[in-house]
Image (spheres, rainbow, N blue to C red):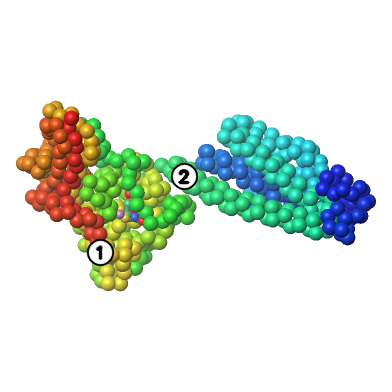
């Protein structure tokens, strides 16, 4: 069957004509024209169906288990099978581009196999085509189940991909045959061809998009794997674990350290930036005497300190959960900036993120407090969501003016010359965390036992100063002093608990905190924006 060669119609169901019959099956006067399927159509059908299958395999594997890639694994197997002398020859000949040569080789093999599959299918030998496809699936499946393979997920992904590939092959082959070999008059054939091109094009388009998604999942997985492989250096002077007394031992009260997976999260980026430490660097510049550029390794060589600090979001409503406490590991920001030498003109320290986010705070913040370029959070490298590989943590300031995640630059500037991301959007330029407190238990609207002692509790914070007292009142009665967790650090929140006895009925409970300077949290209710919210957290419970 050559290109554009006329062929005889056979097995035709749509046309009444017999082989050689040129009478019109459709409109009278039309000629039945049928030509051989051009060779390139075989390549097209084969490559599109194979690519669709591979993409599905990679997507299924990527979604079910982020670090498996059956396609790469088959590639690795093949490399293992190549005799060592040949491999050595390839490495010495192609040097560092041996990977690219390998990939090109894989592509050539895949295209050859696809072409075979597509051509067989277009010649009506679907069974043979499917057999070749099945052999490919078998190879993928076996290497998944083999030692060091992707396991059952790889097998499942390969089988699903193979099935889809077969389906696409069958449909596209049908469409191509309708366009070239099946009967019909000239206009029917050209309509069928158009249909074939649309189907092939649409499948190719979806495959490309899917391939992009699969590649994206893989690059995420690569950063996730890199992060898991990192061993952070120990701090110069490790902090002991906080005394047991920081906990008031009441169920429902937030744990002293917020587990990373429960830590609140605020970011402007639509997707979390995935930054590899290989590509990461921190530039310290602007109004400094010496610009510094530090890569991840150099950063980890700096003396590391541990800092227990609570960070909070300015958008937190009274009683809200946009606050968390962690043990951060990092290098001191003041040391770093003194090394760069802050010019006297500078009054603002701006953190810039790889995602374009910026946050600025006064140079006066470097007052000895434990501000750090953090790399660790609660004993592990920063989670990706929380700024891996590095972020700023500045105790006492709201996140939006200080806690830049995925930090890439620290620039010394003047407030009059630069405003951080949220400032032109209407938020206060300077934003110290305000004294506040909240109920964790019971929750608003809870039903409780009437006449029995009821444990109520939560957390309170007065950043840098520390909490002196927490008081609770029922139904706007007398304020009663709550019991506090052991005083630990001004930069962390403090747990509190209290006992109340409620009559049957609905009751309001309020809580307020006082800092160590004797200042009591204001009861004035203000919603967040342009500064923090204020007011006493008030819940209502029904005792029965
Ligand atoms: N790059 C970047 N850093 C950022 C933000 C952001 O949107 N992008 N949000 C900030 C805000 S508003 C807060 S409250 C804290 C939240 O940090 P977390 O998500 O680790 O809890 O990060 C700050 N750092
Ligand atoms: Mo925030």
- 255 versus 185 height, above or below: above
**Left or right of 220, for residue 241:** left
Q: Position of residue 22 (x, y in %)?
A: 91, 55
Q: Residues within 10 Å of mark 1 (few under 14, many from 20)?
A: many
Mark yes or no: residue 160 visible: yes
Mark 2 C-beta to ligand 1 under 8 Å: no
Name the disc covering residue 36, or none: none
The extreme front residue here reads 28
Say whether disc 1 or disc 2 marks the residue closer to the N-terminus. 2
Q: Residue at x 52, y 41 (%)?
A: 63
User: Where in the image, quadrant-wise, is ligand 1 located?
Assistant: bottom left
Task: Identify which residue, 332 or 165, lies in the foreground.
Answer: 165
The reply to whether discs 1 and 2 touch (Cβ–Cβ < 8 Å) is no
Q: Position of residue 429 (x, y in %)?
A: 25, 64
SS class of the residue under badge 1?
Answer: loop
Q: Residue at x 47, y 55 (%)?
A: 279
Mark yes or no: residue 305 visible: no
Mark 2, residue position: 224
**Left or right of 85, for residue 152:** left
Mark 1, residue position: 429
Q: Total label count?
A: 2
Q: Position of residue 309 (x, y in %)?
A: 25, 47
Mark 1 C-beta to ligand 1 under 8 Å: no
Q: Residue at x 17, y 32 (%)?
A: 543
**Left or right of 424, for residue 364:** left
Mark 1 or 2, which is nearer the eye? 1
The extreme left residue here reads 478
Q: Residue at x 58, y 31 (%)?
A: 152
Task: Identify which residue, 395 or 340, lies in the foreground.
Answer: 395
Q: Quadrant of residue 417?
A: bottom left
Residues at marks 1 and 2, CA–CA distance in whole angstroms = 35 Å
SS class of the residue under badge 2?
Answer: helix
């Amino acid at each position: 069957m050559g290109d554009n060669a006329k062929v005889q119609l056979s097995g035709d169901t749509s046309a009444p004509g017999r082989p050689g019959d040129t009478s019109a099956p459709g409109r009278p006067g039309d000629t039945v024209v049928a030509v051989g399927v051009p060779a390139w159509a075989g390549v097209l059908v084969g490559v599109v169906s194979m690519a669709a299958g591979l993409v599905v395999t990679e997507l299924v594997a990527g979604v079910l288990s982020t670090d498996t890639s059956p396609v790469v694994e088959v590639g690795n197997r093949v490399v293992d099978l190549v005799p060592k002398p040949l491999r050595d020859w390839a490495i010495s000949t192609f040097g560092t581009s041996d990977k690219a040569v390998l990939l090109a080789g894989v592509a050539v093999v895949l295209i050859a196999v696809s072409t075979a599959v597509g051509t067989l299918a277009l010649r009506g030998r679907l069974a043979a085509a499917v057999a070749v496809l099945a052999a490919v699936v078998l190879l993928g499946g076996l290497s998944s189940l083999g030692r060091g393979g992707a396991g059952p997920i790889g097998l499942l992904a390969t089988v699903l991909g193979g099935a889809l590939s077969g389906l696409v092959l069958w449909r596209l082959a049908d469409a191509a045959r309708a366009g070239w070999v099946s009967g019909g008059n000239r206009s029917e054939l050209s309509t069928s061809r158009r249909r074939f091109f649309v189907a092939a094009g649409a499948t190719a388009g979806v495959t490309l998009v899917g391939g992009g998604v699969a590649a994206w999942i893989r690059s995420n997985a690569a950063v996730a794997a890199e992060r898991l492989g990192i061993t952070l250096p120990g701090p110069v002077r490790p902090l002991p674990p906080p005394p047991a007394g920081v906990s008031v031992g009441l169920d429902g009260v937030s744990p002293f350290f917020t587990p990373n997976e429960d830590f609140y999260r605020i970011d402007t980026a639509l997707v979390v930036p995935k930054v590899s430490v290989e590509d990461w660097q921190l530039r310290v510049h602007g109004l400094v005497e010496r610009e510094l550029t530090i890569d991840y390794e150099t950063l980890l060589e700096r003396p590391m300190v541990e800092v227990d600090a609570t960070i909070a979001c300015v958008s937190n409503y009274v009683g809200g959960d946009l606050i968390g406490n962690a043990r951060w590991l990092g290098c001191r920001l003041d040391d770093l900036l003194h090394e760069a030498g802050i010019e006297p003109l500078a009054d603002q320290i701006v953190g810039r993120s790889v995602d374009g986010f910026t946050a600025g705070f006064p140079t006066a913040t470097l007052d000895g407090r434990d501000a750090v370029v953090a790399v660790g959070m609660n004993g592990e490298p920063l989670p990706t969501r929380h700024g891996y590989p590095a972020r700023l943590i500045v105790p006492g300031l709201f996140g939006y003016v200080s806690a830049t995640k995925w930090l890439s630059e620290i620039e010394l500037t003047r407030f009059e010359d630069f405003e951080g991301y949220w400032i032109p959007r209407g938020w206060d330029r300077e934003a110290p965390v305000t004294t506040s407190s909240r109920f964790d238990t019971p929750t608003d609207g809870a039903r409780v036992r009437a006449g029995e002692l009821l444990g109520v509790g939560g957390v309170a914070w007065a950043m840098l100063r520390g909490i002196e007292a927490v008081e609770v009142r029922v139904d706007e009665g007398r304020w009663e002093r709550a019991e506090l967790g052991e005083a630990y650090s001004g930069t962390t929140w403090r747990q509190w608990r209290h006992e109340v006895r409620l009559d049957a009925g609905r009751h309001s409970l309020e809580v307020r905190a006082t800092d160590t300077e004797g200042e009591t949290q204001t009861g004035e209710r203000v919603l967040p924006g342009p500064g923090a919210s204020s007011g006493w957290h008030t819940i209502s419970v029904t005792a029965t």
